[in-house]
Image (cartoon, coloured by chain):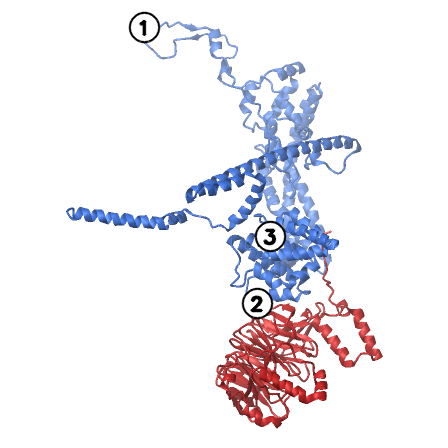
Amino acid sequence: MHTHMWKQIRDRETGKLHANHFSNRVKSNRISQLQLSNHKDIISPHKGAINSLQIDSTEGRYLLSAASDASVAVYDVQRPTVSEAAAAISKHTSILVVDKQHQHAHKYAVSTAIWYPIDTGLFVTGSYDHHVNVWDTNTTQVVVNFKMPGKVHRIAMSNLSTSHMLIATGTEDVQVRLCDIASGAFAHTLSGHRDGIMTVEWSNSSEWVLVTGGCDGAIRFWDIRRAGCFQVLDQSRTQLGRRPPILKRSMITKDSSTKLRAAQKKHANGSGSRQLPIGRVPSKGPMKQRLHPGMLSTQDRATAHYGAVTGLKDTEDGMYLLSAGSDSRLRLWDIESGCDTLVNFETVRLQINKPLQLATTQDSTLVFIPCMRSVKVFDMWSGNTYSILRGHYECVNSCWFNQQDQELYTGGNDRQILVWSPARSIADEMDEGPAEDQDNWSS
Amino acid sequence: MGAEEGAHGKGRKVVSLIEKATNSTAPEVDPRLLKAIKTVVRYSDSELRFATQTLMDIMKRDHSQVRYLALLIIDELFMRSKLFRTLVVDHLDQLLTLSVGFRRHLPLPAPPAVASVLRSRAIEFLEKWNVTFGVHYRQLRLGYDYLKNTLRLQFPNIQANVERIHQERRERERRSKEILLRKYESLKENSSSIKGGILTTMDEIDECLEILHAKQESVSDYILDNEEHGDFRSLELQQLRLEALKEGEKVYENSDNTVVFDTLRELYKLLVTKHFVSIKEWISVLVRVEVADNRFRDSILKEFIDIRNRLKSIKNKCEEAGCSLQNSSKHDEEDFWEEGNVVSMEILSSSPNSPNKHLGEASTSHEMNNDNLGLHNTSSSDTDSLLDKEHKTESNSQRSKLIAEAPAVRWSSYLDNWGSKRVFMANQRGLELESHWGRVDEDAVIPADKIAELNVHAMPYEEKEFEIQPCLAPLRKGGLCQRRDLKICPFHGPIIPRDDEGRPLNQSSSENMSMDLRTDLVEQLSKQAVKNVCERDQEVAKKREIDKRLLKRAKLAKIREHNEAVLRDAALASTSRSATLGEDEEVGNADKLFVRDNKQSLASMLRKKVTSKDRIAQKLLSSRARVTADRQQVSCEDFKYRDAFPNQW
């Protein structure tokens, strides 16, 4: 393995290997060795189940956790607060805790806490006490407060957005509300779901597209610039495998774009409906309007899962969507066609009564799914189990993959936040603690 | 391929070993099997992997005993092998689930007694593992933390306990040091008064002794004068004389010096009970105390030691003068020689009072009466005995020889008319019978020989009185073993003559071989050793045979018991005979039975004990019983009805 590594470095030196490729290879190599970290402990002050975890997207350094005991905490995952030199275990205690002692704290469990995507000066929490609070990190004061009609299950902000500061909130209520931090009011109310909304997710390809999953088993796509949802995923519409890779595809379009379009049309007809490309030029506006599936009652009734949709995660390129349902199924959807790609994920059982937070690696090859007490790592495209991460003693609720350090953070009902990191290199281990772990057979 | 198969075969070996080790009802894993597992696993990683897999599988068995034994093996391997740790730690939650049983839907299986032991041991092991290897395995820390802080299980907290005990001990030491220091301070202040008190007592004693010795001089002179007349022909008598001289030097209490003796005794008592103890205490305080300035301590310690030595010497003097306070041992010794028929031992013969013993045996017939009377009351006063000795010095040696041969006779009334030829009047007893039975011959005489016949002394056979010797083996805490057994002390082996410090006098007894053996002894010893080994081997062989026989018998008994149980079950269940027949046939095969028996015992742990209540309930609540009861009731009612209305149909 190490000789392989050296070869790559030599290739990189000589310029045979592109910088991007090189880093990707190193990263994937590290990810493949993911295991429970012995040298990094996050000591959580929470007295309840951890419901959500997030690393900020600006520095990739601050971990925000929300727990059932109405507390929120922030940790620095880069610099340990206490480093035990002898034990070689770095301990990360929280640098900021908002719990019930705080005057503006939530009354009930905090279901989600997210960073403001632009910087770490703000974070947003949604709670079962029907409130969504926007906090100033530095003063730990509530700056904006939204009163929701029901328990807040999940909130989300778009990483791409340049033109809006909307918090999408999924609550017990059937309507999805978008809260505008700038104005402090609800900007949108999206109605279409027939039951509470378990999970919300912004698209990774368009800042205006929102995906929501409800307890009615439907996954709806919303374009926030217009009324109603424009797509409902239907588990009965399937396609085998993924689309051809983009490179080939662009070449083909260069060659014969019309032909492809015709083929696509044919394909769409064959599957009984026409899908809408996301974020395309709005030249096809009238046609979209005409074909809006939200208008069609048959389309509108479609479900993506039997039971509730508990987790959503779209790939980094925004082309695929992974959904988890209380029917213990994982489905990988092709967003453009709206079809289930029929990838068989070997899940055993998923937690059904809580929204799950899924995570993917940067190149979307691996996906981390909380499966009861363990976290399963699946190959995204084949559905094969890559590895099973066992460490929690009770159900795992959330995963977050730190793209920068290739570390996985998981939080569960056992109040622990576990760090899964690549195995440390031998050089690191050399200067470990004085007490080396070794065999001690009686002679 | 072949190698792989070989590995597989080896794996089978460790698997079968583990299976065998866990298939038992014992509370511990058979140490030999455990050792075998360890050795097999130690030299091969593949075996270890197999073992891990097997153990984890066995932990899933639905029997707490099996799980418990597997857990014990896991602990053994866990403490030793790194690879095993890394393998087990990955499945730690599973292991804990199966051993602690903290998940509600997965409780520990059946025998509840074993299950509770399993749980407590598992918790104990987890704590131990966490203390030892927690640094290296996050999983261990997690598991420990979860059980402790989330489930709030009670851990034995060995580490903390040890810490606490240390703390307590330190505290105690500190306190005792403080006390010592305080004592030391107080001693510093009133050392002179303590010394003064002791010194005055000692001076007084000295004075008393002086007075006594001054009085006694005249007496000793008298004795010396007497002695010059005597002729001492035998060595024995010379010894006697020396003894007497020594005795003569002693001062004896009489009416003249009673007062002096009383004060002396008083002072001696004070000395022994108070001063001696206090000085010892102070010395120990001085030895133990830690002070910055050692000068005062050293000087006072020296003084105290001097005082102690003086005290000792004075005490000895007092004791010589006859002030014995609590020396009961001396009394014992006196009893000892007076009884006189004890098997003599070297220790005794070397003791200073052996001449006295000879003296006691040589008691003259003259003194017989006297001696016999005074034999058992020990206090034939010393002055008397002194007189006796004077008589004896005059008696010639032949006589003494004869006396030595003469038999000792018990004293009784017949001695009143020993050797007398008197005749007794038969009918003159002071009672006038007045010829009640006819004519009375007043002058009837019982002849002397008749009297002698009547008076024949009956001597009951007396077993030689034998004092059982104390074992006298040195004890670990000091002192000698005072157990009195006939031949073998249960703690120190055969009773052999020993010297004052408890060392065996006869070195050849192989049990208590001391290290400083002489070369000429070695041969003898080696012979003895060979003999011992042979004997032991024989014994072992015999024992083994007996064991084997016992085992066989036990097995047979078990078979019989089993058969009976089966028959009883069959009778109770009243099943068809063929069902039980098959079982009986199985029983025939002894080898099979052994395995079956074992399994049964494992299974029998699971079976609930059937109480008599259960049996009664089973009988009463069975459907058949209920049906018959119903029918009986119905027919009973029918009868009643018929009786009430006899003419109705």
Location of residue B370 in the rendering, given as x and y in whole percent from the top left corner = 55, 21
Location of residue A179 in the rendering, given as x and y in whole percent from the top left corner = 55, 89
Q: CA distance from mark 2 to mark 1?
A: 115 Å
**Element on which disc 1 rests:** loop
**Element on which disc 3 rests:** helix
Residue A137 makes an appearance in the image: no
Amino acid type, callout 2: Asn
Q: State whether discs 3 and 2 lie on one chain.
A: yes
Q: Nearer the viewer, mark 3 or mark 2?
A: 3
**Which chain is disc 3 placed on?**
B
Which chain comes out blue in the rendered image? B
Task: State the residue position of label 1.
Answer: B438
Q: Nearer the viewer, residue B487 or B88?
A: B88
Circle 1 Cα neighbour tier, 10 Å, few/some/many (<14 / 14–19 / ≥20): few
Amino acid type, callout 3: Leu
Amino acid type, callout 1: Gly
Q: Which mark is residue B149?
A: 2
User: Which colour denotes chain A?
Assistant: red
Compared to A352, does B159 lie above or below? above
**Which chain is disc 1 placed on?**
B
Residue B635 makes an appearance in the image: yes
Q: So how many labels did they put on this image?
A: 3
Q: Nearer the viewer, residue A256 or B585?
A: A256
Q: Earlier in the sequence, mark 2 or mark 1?
A: 2
Q: Which mark is residue B69?
A: 3
**Quadrant in the rendering for residue B64:** bottom right
Location of residue B407 in the rendering, given as x and y in whole percent from the top left corner = 59, 16
Circle 2 Cα neighbour tier, 10 Å, few/some/many (<14 / 14–19 / ≥20): few
